[in-house]
Amino acid sequence: MYDKRDIIIIGGGPAGIAAAVSAYDRFREAGIAKPSILVIERDKVLGGILNQCIHNGFGLHTFKEELTGPEYAGRFIDKLKERNIEYMLETMVMSITPDRKVTAMNRERGLFTIEAKAIVLAMGCRERARGALNIPGYRPAGIYSAGTAQRLVNIEGFMPGREVVILGSGDIGLIMARRMTLEGARVKVVAELMPYSGGLKRNIVQCLNDFDIPLKLSHTVVDIKGRERVESVTIAEVDDKLRPIPGTEEEYTCDTLLLSCGLIPENELSNGAGIGMNPVTNGPFVNESMETDVPGIFACGNVLHVHDLVDYVSEEAGNAGLHAAMYCLGQISSGSANEKVINVKTANSVRYTVPSVIRPDQMGDELTVRFRVGNVYKNCYIDVYLDDECIIHRKRPVVAPGEMENIVLKKEQLTGRKIENVRVELDINE
Amino acid sequence: MSEKISLTCIGCPLGCTVNVVKSGNTIESISGNTCKRGYDYAQTEVLAPVRTVTSTVRVNGGRNPVVAVKTEAPIPKGKIKDCMKAIYNIKVNAPVAIGDVICDNIADTGVRLVASAND
């Protein structure tokens, strides 16, 4: 006999906590005095990556005030503790199965298996490392992912270097450019392969411009020198096929190279359970209830698709937790053959949507569909079609790959008639 | 002579482009902002820019060697360096909780430095 819980949530970061809180509240509304929910976290503390994001700017949507990462996490951890929701720390989930058995291990219990009625995947993401970037040059000390440097400075309390070059303009890289500067380092340049920044505009302003740190778009690292420790980094301009242009090389003397080149959802557990993956997001395909194609397994946060804003993670995770509870309570059906299903399709530079499938009978009054675009466009429109009928035509002064977009669909738009596809696309009328 | 300034608002992640027309220290117009926050940001940014500073201070006897801190309100941009210098010399003793006042008046800005994490 296995140990049992109604819901097991894998990951105690912002997504996992928000999912747990909303699942709990749903069980209570249904009259269950003591909901059986377990959050499993591999770190020593709850809160996930927010603990090292000590900068401010979190929570404007959720709490209507500007918080730092640990403060934002703290608010949600309080909600979890007020509800007495069970959690395990320093516990690593080793595998999950399609019939929802979770095998985990920790120092007290060793290896153990718990059976759940529903699972919420909230494992987050990890940074793309040097090995995945094919940067030539030596392999000396002094090359860190931006997130590792962030942890060293903000949690461990030491500086990874004094003279810094940053490759990639993701938000963590921009934030670390400012943080290292404030701590006395000299950040010489931020090089970005693409012709646009991967981070939020506000971070370019307050992290780079404020400190006169140059951002070189369409540039990449072509050489790293130094045997024991980084001695210099050479960057070069790239052409429109992203190939370095000979003769544009510039060598920067430095002791540190930070990499902020994208985040990858951490889906080894999902793959092990045979969950269908979207090759664009590297996260599971989900329906309107944030349920994957394996019934009873839900996903939310950065393991589903990488977000820019934790506020949206909390919102999405709340939705996943809610539906996981409804699934346990028998309040949503799962996969009957004649159920009405609408596919969400994309066109014209819309790269993906979450969710990718909508069952109108299961959706709430409103459903937020989030997506990203593939390039920077100015003065364009976001268009939404129900088969051939355009129902949303919204002007956007600028859209960019680094900034997630969303549209809201209403239940009344999708019910009461036959619709095969919802299509989200960009109208680029320039 | 009026001067046109184009800003990117840092009030929230939308990052609206806000256009300000000013002559000397008088603002003639602000446009492009999509909320009150953007209006306020543009006004402050062209006359006397401010930033919230977040950093860490050393902590004795805590779980980690440092604990996160922030200025309770934004401080003048020109004071950031002094603020960081002051922060560098602060040591606190555990336990530290979110909201604990670490310094009453950081670098003579009249703003309090508070803990933004627990340790």
Image: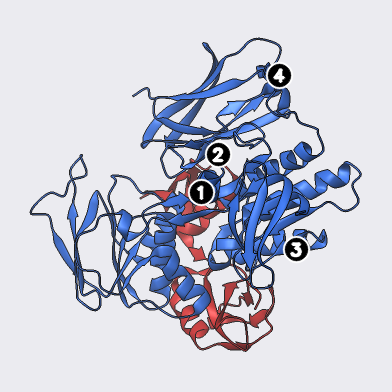
Residue A192 spot, x, y in % from top left: 29, 53
Please report whichever mark, 2 or 1, sits nearer to the chain's N-terminal start.
Answer: 1
- Chain letter, red: B
- Regarding residue A64, the answer to whether it shows in the image is no
Of helix, strand and loop, which one carries label 4?
helix
What is the crowding at mark 3: few (fewer than 14 residues within 10 Å), some, or many (at least 20)? few
Disc 2 residue type?
Answer: Ile
**Horizontal relation, residue A57 to residue A127: left or right:** right
What is the crowding at mark 4: few (fewer than 14 residues within 10 Å), some, or many (at least 20)? few
Distance of label 1 from label 4 (alpha carbons): 35 Å
Disc 4 residue type?
Answer: Glu
Residue at label 3? A78
Residue at label 1? A267
> Do tag 3 and tag 1 residues touch (Cβ < 8 Å)?
no
Task: Give the letter of the chain under mark 4.
Answer: A
Please report whichever mark, 2 or 4, sits nearer to the chain's N-terminal start.
Answer: 2
Q: Nearer the viewer, residue A83 or A103?
A: A103
Of helix, strand and loop, which one carries label 2?
loop
Q: Nearer the viewer, mark 2 or mark 4?
A: 2
Residue at label 4? A412
Of helix, strand and loop, which one carries label 3?
helix
Distance of label 2 from label 4 (alpha carbons): 31 Å
> Do tag 2 and tag 1 residues touch (Cβ < 8 Å)?
yes
- On screen, residue A75 above or below B105: above
Task: Give the letter of the chain under mark 3.
Answer: A
Distance of label 3 from label 1 (alpha carbons): 28 Å
- The image quadrant that residue A81 belongs to is bottom right
Disc 3 residue type?
Answer: Asp
Residue at label 2? A275
